[in-house]
Amino acid sequence: MSRTSVHGDDVDGGDDLDVDLGLRPESRVERRANRRKQRARRSFGCFAGLVSLAVVGALIGGLVFGFGKGRDYLEQVFAAPDYDGEGTGSVMVEVTRGQSAQAIADTLEKKDVVKSARAFERAAREEPRSVQLQAATYTLRKKMSAKAALALMLDPAKSIKVTRFGVVSGSTKDVVAQKLQENKVIKLPPGSVAAALAKPETLGLPSYAKNNPEGFLYPGTYDVPKNATAYSILRLMTGQFAKTQAELKLPQVAQRKKLDPYQAVIVASIIAAETNRAEDYPKVARVIYNRLQRGMRLQMDSTVHYVAGKSGGVFTTDEERALDSPYNTYKNRGLPPTPINSPGKDTLRAALHATPGPWLYFTLVNLDTGETAFAATDQEHLANVKKLQAWCQAHKGRC
């Protein structure tokens, strides 16, 4: 292999590279100097190691020989900041269903009920009864110790000033009245709900409601204040209907569509009773309007169920369809005289904005998924009904 100068343009490396680069043995003077540098480095390393050991030893000594002071110091460093005492003033804190202890603690800290979320979490871990915390709106105080805050929340008679009361969409007036009257937390006097409903002119109903609360006890979840009356609770519900009506511009839209607003609420209530899929609501509305325009009877099982006092189920019997009632849309043409339940926002919107289409019929075909089939002809509808019958046959007792 040819040798090439290190200063040349081409450097050809090889087995003799060290020699080619001009490396040579150290002189005696250089070796002595290098040994002195190495000894100095070793001495510094030993010193650094001794310093490190001395620091560790000092820390250990502090913990061993001054344990009391060391413990106090660590507790201050790692302790969760906390207030002392029962706090002052008043603050409302909402706890929702399924909320974690951490989320509750964060809320309490943000509202300055407790000094730190960590303190409340620690108090909750140490208190077995903390698992009994219920979803509610609590009245607490500011600047409470974590233990005091938890203890107050675990005493609902003192901390829960409002009670959650819920009504699902499609609930009838009678169902709402029964749930409200039987609520063991609200504890209304016997007969008070019926008495309030018997004075509809005091409930804040819209003028077109004809003094009938059916359809206007708006579904939703309400925070009922402590010592609320049946009258004030029902006013909460009709007040929420008024807000929803304003948001949807229900009277104005109905007027533009040459529809009475009361009729719109009636249609919405039928939709709420007939199907539970939001995507089908406007199509069900279209079926209702198409049948009305053609002078066809609506033949809605839901209106028959209403007059029969029946809930659930899909079919009606011959006896039920023969009932002599203005709500029997198998016998009478047009809409029933009133809503048949309390519709929600989505069904009210659907009644105002029906999907264009030729459908005259619809039926559920799968009760588990809520799938609904729509048809424009008798033949199509009968085929869909057979699908429902087959489903019911495969799921005994469900229909």
Image (cartoon, rainbow, N blue to C red):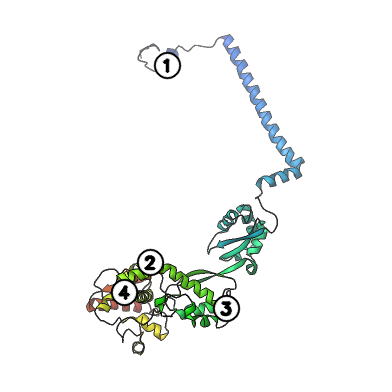
At 61% across and 63% down in the image, what residue appears? 139
Horizontally, is 194 left or right of 244 in the view? Answer: right
Residue beneath label 1, please? 17
Dot 3 surroundings within 10 Å: few (below 14), some, or many (20 or more)? some
| CA separation in Å, label 2 and label 1 | 89 Å
Mark sitting earlier along the chain (2/1): 1
At 54% across and 61% down in the image, what residue appears? 99
Q: What is the x, y in percent for residue 240?
A: 46, 69
Which mark's residue is nearer the viewer, 1 or 4?
Answer: 4
Q: Is residue 102 above or below residue 62?
A: below
At numbered mark 3, what does the secondary structure look like: helix, strand or loop? loop
Residue beneath label 4, please? 259
| CA separation in Å, label 1 and label 3 | 101 Å
Of the 4 image quadrants, the one containing the C terminus is: bottom left
Q: What is the x, y in percent for residue 108?
A: 59, 57
Residue beneath label 2, please? 248
At numbered mark 2, what does the secondary structure look like: helix, strand or loop? helix
Q: Amino acid at mark 4?
A: Leu
Q: Amino acid at mark 3?
A: Leu
Cβ–Cβ under 8 Å for marks 4 and 3: no
Mark sitting earlier along the chain (2/3): 3
Residue beneath label 3, please? 188
Mark sitting earlier along the chain (4/3): 3
Q: Amino acid at mark 1?
A: Leu
Say which of 211 and 137 sits in front.
Answer: 211
Which mark's residue is nearer the viewer, 1 or 3?
Answer: 3
Which mark's residue is nearer the viewer, 2 or 3?
Answer: 2
At 74% across and 38% down in the image, what residue appears? 61
